[in-house]
């Protein structure tokens, strides 16, 4: 049975149709064209499809694209993390310039829960609650036990490869008791290569920030969404024709049931529109996307304990923005009412 056209975005041969959206976050099928909180609560739902420590996929249903895109942008740019902001370079005799090395250090993801730390004010000094300190002290020397005929630098030299495993956390005050073990997320990130006689001595200071200020504070590697595919077969396809139809889609999308093609897993469809290249299928297969059904994919870089914590923080940030907007609107409305009263009295 064909679904309501306004619920879906149609994918044609070389264009997309029915892309107009609603001004209200309840979705396109709100024929009253007005926002209702009760309807929004009933329609909106979040279904977790898969979740691991660093990745999460979930379905956000019953909202407009503006709501989904706001969540995506918050995940990328407004959920805070801890990152190296300043470096005190006491010695660097390597071939890498100081500013390049400092930039590389700043991009190292730090395994520290930012919810336990405070932002540093403009004129505020560092303390136990608003910063983390690391040190990097490495000197490359020749390996006296290396084989004479070896040509491998990792065997000929000691500490030739400086990685994030060489970063040492310096707890301040009671940070060790409060925060546990703080370290880089990955300990195998190559920072720089040294040769005998070259040495590095650096102090690094991590502070809390957001990706809107610099990408090093962004907590995600990927935060994206796509509309859920919807496929309709307008006629029966059997035999060899069904097999050819199945080959037009990604594996699992079309299944053959007793020789007849049936839509199975639309979620796996990549919307390549390969089916539209064939005259025998073009007018009998409808490719659409659910307008208010978003498939979210979030990949954390590991700063938060889990990807679910990251998504939860994004929703909290969105709620704070809404609360601030409501507060501002109410204040402006009250100011306008007071001005009207003053004019009437005068």
Image (cartoon, rainbow, N blue to C red):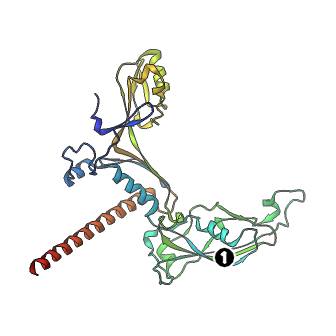
Tell me residue 192's x, y (percent).
71, 65
Query: Image quadrant of residue 284?
Result: top left
Query: Horizontal placement of 83 versus 271: left or right?
Result: right
Query: Horizontal placement of 260 versus 85: left or right?
Result: left
Q: Does residue 263 lie above or below 217 as drawn?
A: above
Tell me residue 202's x, y (percent).
66, 76
Q: Residue at x 50, y 84 (%)?
A: 125
State how many labels appear.
1
Tell me residue 335's x, y (percent).
20, 75
In depth, the one of 18 and 178 nearer the eye is: 18
Query: Image quadrant of residue 5?
Result: top left
Residue extending farthest to the front is 346
In depth, the one of 126 and 173 nearer the eye is: 126
Quadrant (top left/top right/bottom left/bottom right) for the C terminus: bottom left
Q: Secondary structure at mark 1?
A: strand
Quadrant (top left/top right/bottom left/bottom right) for the N terminus: top left
Residue extending farthest to the top is 239
Q: Residue at x 24, y 42 (%)?
A: 29
Q: Residue at x 41, y 32 (%)?
A: 12
Q: Residue at x 23, y 71 (%)?
A: 332
**For the residue carrying disc 1, how many other residues have a C-alpha within 10 Å: few (<14), some (14-19), or many (20+)?**
some
Residue identified by numbered label 1: 202
Tell me residue 8's x, y (percent).
33, 38
Residue extending farthest to the left is 345
């Amino acid at each position: 049975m064909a679904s309501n056209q306004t619920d879906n975005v149609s994918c044609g041969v070389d264009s997309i149709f029915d892309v107009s959206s609603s001004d209200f976050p309840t979705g396109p099928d709100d024929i009253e064209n007005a926002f209702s909180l009760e309807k929004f609560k009933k329609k909106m739902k979040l279904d977790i499809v898969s979740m691991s420590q660093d990745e999460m996929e979930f379905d956000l249903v019953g909202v407009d694209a503006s709501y989904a895109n706001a969540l995506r942008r918050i995940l990328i740019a407004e959920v805070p993390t801890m990152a190296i902001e300043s470096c005190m370079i006491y010695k660097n005799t390597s071939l890498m310039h100081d500013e390049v090395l400092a930039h590389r250090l700043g991009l190292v993801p730090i395994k520290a829960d930012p919810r336990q730390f405070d932002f540093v004010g403009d004129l505020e000094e560092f303390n136990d609650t608003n910063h983390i300190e690391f040190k990097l002290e490495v000197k490359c020397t020749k390996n006296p036990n290396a084989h004479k005929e070896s040509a491998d630098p990792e065997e000929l030299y000691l500490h030739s490869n400086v990685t994030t495993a060489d970063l040492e956390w310096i707890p301040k005050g009671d940070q060790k008791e409060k925060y546990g073990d703080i370290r880089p997320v990955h300990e195998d990130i190559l920072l720089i290569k040294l040769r005998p006689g070259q040495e590095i001595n650096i102090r690094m200071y991590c502070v809390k920030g957001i990706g809107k200020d610099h990408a090093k504070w962004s907590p995600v590697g990927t935060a994206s969404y796509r509309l859920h595919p919807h496929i309709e077969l307008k006629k029966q396809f059997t035999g060899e024709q069904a097999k050819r139809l199945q080959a037009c889609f990604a594996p699992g999308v079309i299944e053959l049931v007793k020789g007849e093609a049936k839509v199975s897993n639309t979620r796996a469809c990549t919307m390549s529109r390969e089916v539209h290249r064939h005259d025998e299928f073009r007018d009998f297969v409808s490719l659409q996307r659910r307008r208010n059904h978003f498939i979210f994919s979030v990949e954390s870089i590991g700063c938060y304990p889990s990807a679910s914590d990251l998504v939860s923080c994004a929703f909290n940030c969105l709620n704070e923005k809404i609360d601030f907007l409501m507060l501002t609107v109410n204040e402006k409305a009250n100011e306008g009412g007071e001005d009207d009263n003053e004019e009437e009295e005068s």
